[in-house]
Each structure stands twice: as C-alpha cells, then as structure tokens.
C-alpha cells in the first residue's frame, strides 16, 4: 500500500521558546479516511498547515505521496492536496457558485473550453447542479461547504484535508457533509481524506482515529478500538460517541450488548 503522507521527527512552534510538536511521527496510507481529533490547542490545524506548506518545520521531514515537501517543490506538492476550511464564507471568491468552482481550475491553468464540463461534473457530485448560477450568500451552511468541496475536488487532488469543515454547521449540515464524504470515498477509493474535527460521531465512519493532545499523538487506532479507551479520550478533554456511552450504561446495568451498531443493539434488546 502506497503512502499518502509521512511525517518524520517533525518539530514545530510559532515561537522558538515554545514548540507545539517536538517529535511528531505519522504515516497515512493512500485511500485511508482518517479522522484527527483533539481539543482546542492540540495542534490539529497547525498540522494541516504543515502538510500544505503554510507552516515551515524547524526539524524533520514531510513527504506527500513520496515527495519531500521543500521550498523548491512546494507548489508541485500542493497540486495533489485540496483543503476545506472551517468557515465556508471565507472560501468564496466568485459571485456565483459556477464562478467559485471555476476559480481553482483557472489557477491550475485548465483550458476554458474544458472547464464547463468539469464544473458541471463536480457540482453534480456534491448535489449542487441546480445552484450553479446562485449567489453563495443565498446558500445554507451545508450547501456552501458542498460548493467548497466541489471546488477542491475539481482540481483532482489525491489528498483532501477537511479542517473543521463542519464546525459551523447545524446537525443537518453536518450529516449532509458526512454522507457526502462517504459517497466520495465509495466513488474514488484511492482518495485519501484527513478530517480534522470535533465531531466525535464522524469518527465512527473513519478507517482510523488519531487523537492529538498537546502536540502528541495519544491514540492511533481503528474507531472500534479507540473508543474502548474512554479514559484516553477524557484525558484529552474529548467525549466518546453516544452509542458507546449507551453500550457502557447498558452493560453497567446488566444488559450485555456487544454490538456497536445501533440497529443491531435494538434488535438484541428486543429479543
């Protein structure tokens, strides 16, 4: 399995006196869907900026699809990476949805006679075809993030970073983006997704959960294994998914439920 990202012995801090990462090591394989959890100040967004070269490390190496990230090849590496930020309003450039999706294509020097088909393709993928001529200000939060995702995907990145992309959305918007993420994975299994989030429920759908606390990786495991250790989550000031709380409470009351799938849990309780 090829690697999408390799971080070796990275040290980084915004000041020389204080380091956020002292010796960070991490490998993410191509096609993985990884959820990165952590409380405010844990280093999540700082890590995203390191991956796309906005933060220059003091020590260590960063490899993206086998290429070491350097000042010389920064823009070449960025062609393989798309990023979605927290506030969708800060991401819009164009006066319409169509113009906004086109912006990244123009920067990538895609010929104009090819752009329309690409815009239509990716608007369709995120369910926004009927909004192409709408002003972004008239869209809901979830719709705005869908447009941001379409704009990022239109340039064909191999790695998509979602940096708190559901933090400002209501529950319906969060659910829409989670469902879209799973649909994108199904359509392109080679797409690597790193979702930086506070949304514990999203982590249930991931291949791997990584928990950062004060610049250290304190958990790096599958969701089913990670949430078997609520003490680690609590020490990192994080919650655990409701379904795990329910299982713990039922087991504590003598109702033994082994399944972590809610429908199967209900079936077991009804037997």
Image: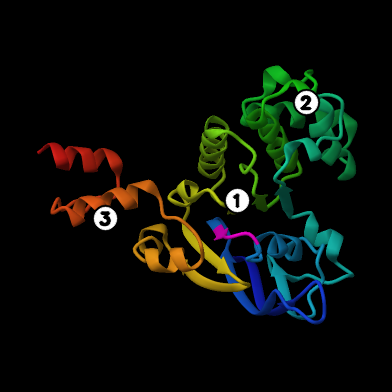
Looking at the rendered image, the disc whose residue lies closer to the viewer, 2 or 3, is 3
Residue at left offset 20%, top offset 56%? 252
Residue at the spot of label 2:
136
Label 1 sits on a secondary structure element that is: loop
Q: In the rendered image, which quarter contains the C terminus?
A: top left
Residue at the spot of label 3:
248
Please tell me which of labels 1 and 2 falls first in the chain.
Answer: 2
Looking at the rendered image, the disc whose residue lies closer to the viewer, 1 or 2, is 2
Please tell me which of labels 2 and 3 falls first in the chain.
Answer: 2
CA distance for labels 1 and 2? 27 Å
Please tell me which of labels 3 and 1 falls first in the chain.
Answer: 1
Residue at left offset 40%, top offset 63%? 226
The majority secondary structure of the magenta stretch comes to: strand
Label 2 sits on a secondary structure element that is: helix
Residue at the spot of label 1:
191
Q: Position of residue 165 (x, y in %)?
A: 65, 44
Residue 202: assigned label: none
**Would residue 133 be seen by someone viewing this image from the given angle?**
yes
State the residue lying farthest toward the left: 271
Q: Compared to 57, does 101 lie above or below?
A: above
Residue 207 is left or right of residue 269, and the answer is right
- Residues 111 and 29: in front is 29
Residue at left offset 43%, top offset 68%? 232
Residue 38, picture quadrant = bottom right
Q: Position of residue 162 (x, y in %)?
A: 65, 49
Q: Give the range drawn in magenta.
A: 36-40
Q: Position of residue 227 (x, y in %)?
A: 38, 60
């Amino acid at each position: 399995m090829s690697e999408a990202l390799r971080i070796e012995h990275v040290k980084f801090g915004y000041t020389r006196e204080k380091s956020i990462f002292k010796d960070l090591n991490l490998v993410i394989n191509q096609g993985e869907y990884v959820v990165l959890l952590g409380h405010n100040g844990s280093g999540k967004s700082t890590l995203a900026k390191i991956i796309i070269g906005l933060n220059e490390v003091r020590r260590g190496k960063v490899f993206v699809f086998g290429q070491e990230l350097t000042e010389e090849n920064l823009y070449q590496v960025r062609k393989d990476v798309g990023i979605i930020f927290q506030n969708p309003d800060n991401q819009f450039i164009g006066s319409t949805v169509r113009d906004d999706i086109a912006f990244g294509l123009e920067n990538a020097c895609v010929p104009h006679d090819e752009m329309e088909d690409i815009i239509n393709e990716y608007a369709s993928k995120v369910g926004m075809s009927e909004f192409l001529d709408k002003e972004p200000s008239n869209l809901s939060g979830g719709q705005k993030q869908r447009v941001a995702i379409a704009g990022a995907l239109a340039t064909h990145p191999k790695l998509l970073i979602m940096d708190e992309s559901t933090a400002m959305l209501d529950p319906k918007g969060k659910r829409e983006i989670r469902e879209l993420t799973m649909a994108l994975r199904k359509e392109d299994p080679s797409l690597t997704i790193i979702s930086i989030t506070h949304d514990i429920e999203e982590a249930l759908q991931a291949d791997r959960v990584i928990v950062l606390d004060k610049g250290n990786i304190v958990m790096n495991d599958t969701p089913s294994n990670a949430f078997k250790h609520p003490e680690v989550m609590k020490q990192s000031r994080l919650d655990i998914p409701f379904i795990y709380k329910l299982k713990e409470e039922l087991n504590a009351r003598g109702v033994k439920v082994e399944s972590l799938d809610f429908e199967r849990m209900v079936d077991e309780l009804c037997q």
